[in-house]
Image (spheres, rainbow, N blue to C red):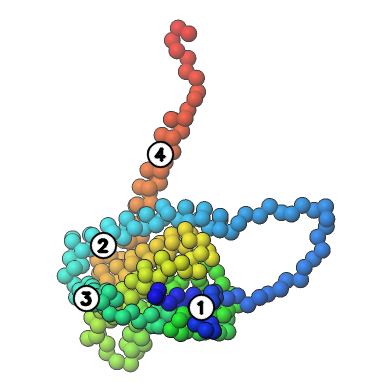
Amino acid sequence: MPPPNPSRSSSRRGVRKPRPRVKVVPYVVPTKRRAPERAAPLTVPTRWVKNLVAIFLLPWAAILTETFFSAFARAAFHQRLWAGAEFWFFSLGALLWLIAFVGLPRPVLVYVFGHELTHALWVWLMGGRVSKFRVGSEGGHIITNRTNFWIALAPYFFPIYSVLAIILYGIATLFVNVAPFGQLLFATIGITWAFHFSFTLWMIPKNQSDLRDHGTFFSLVFIYLMNVALLSFLLILASPQITFASFGADLLKNLRSFAEWAGGVMNQFQHGHDTTPIDLPGS
């Protein structure tokens, strides 16, 4: 039996009825009488626009990926990031979760709750209102008056449980000395981030309506870009030698290299299609 899909809720007699996770409350706009001689405006499907945007995002994803891996390699081998306790506790937490994910029953209900909570959180961040929040073993959904691709795709790039762990740790610092528990925080982030990563990879191939509604190609590119950005942020936090300024400088350097490469390709393309006639000697 396939695992439950958070975007579907149960109905009577055990039959699952498709239901959108982010349901927009209908808003009826009064219609106006159109002049019969006026031609209908030319419209472009939104999905075409998003696919075009995704194509332009691909170079940014490649540049950010190159910057992340080069910074990670430099921190790991030249700056001995691997020798730090933060790195080992984060890795240990991630490894323990991956073993549990493969070998133990998966806590789908916990994932569904975090999934729908992330939708609701981003609705509130976008100024919307959540009128219903439902989570069950068969799936879940929220009903809201606002939706967009940020809200729909947020559970695939926003590790809600990692964020909650960091917030709770920050609140605890106001009342007690939590410095001795810093390594436990990194282990918790490793577990919760691996939870987010493994369930994201597990759910994406299951025909999620969140991805279909905004175009699968655009959704996958956007999710990948945001997850690499998140990993870059965590790398900067975990490595004392890597700062936001140094990472930004590497990003600009790789961006210039890509621009120079793209300019060279364009020049070769133009020269290869140059059909200007050449006067031969003696002609």
Q: Mark 4 — residue?
A: 265
Q: Residue at x 43, y 80 (%)?
A: 112
> In front here: 232 or 108?
108
Between label 1 and label 3, give the one nearer the viewer.
1
Q: Which amino acid does the dot numbered 3 rest on?
A: Leu
Considering the numbered disc 2 on the image, is that residue within a helix, a strand or a loop?
helix
Considering the numbered disc 1 on the image, is that residue within a helix, a strand or a loop?
strand
Q: CA distance from mark 3 to mark 2?
A: 18 Å
Between label 3 and label 2, give the one nearer the viewer.
3
Q: Is residue 222 above or below residue 187?
A: above
Between label 3 and label 4, give the one nearer the viewer.
3
Locate residue 48: give its quadrant.
Answer: bottom right
**Residue 260 locus on image (x, y percent):** 38, 43
How packed is label 2: few (under 14 Cα within 10 Å), some, or many (20 or more)? some
Considering the numbered disc 3 on the image, is that residue within a helix, a strand or a loop?
helix
Q: Is residue 132 above or below residue 42?
A: below
**Residue 195 locus on image (x, y percent):** 33, 76
What number is the disc on residue 194? none
Q: Mark 1 — residue?
A: 16
Q: Mark 2 — residue?
A: 72
What number is the disc on residue 92? 3
Q: Which amino acid does the dot numbered 2 rest on?
A: Phe
**Residue 248 locus on image (x, y percent):** 36, 60
Q: Residue at x 25, y 77 (%)?
A: 103
**Residue 120 locus on image (x, y percent):** 50, 80
Q: Residue at x 41, y 52 (%)?
A: 59
Q: CA distance from mark 3 to mark 4?
A: 44 Å
Q: Are marks 4 and 1 in contact (CB under 8 Å)?
A: no
Q: CA distance from mark 1 to mark 2?
A: 45 Å
Going from N to C along the chain, the mark reached first, 2 or 4, is 2
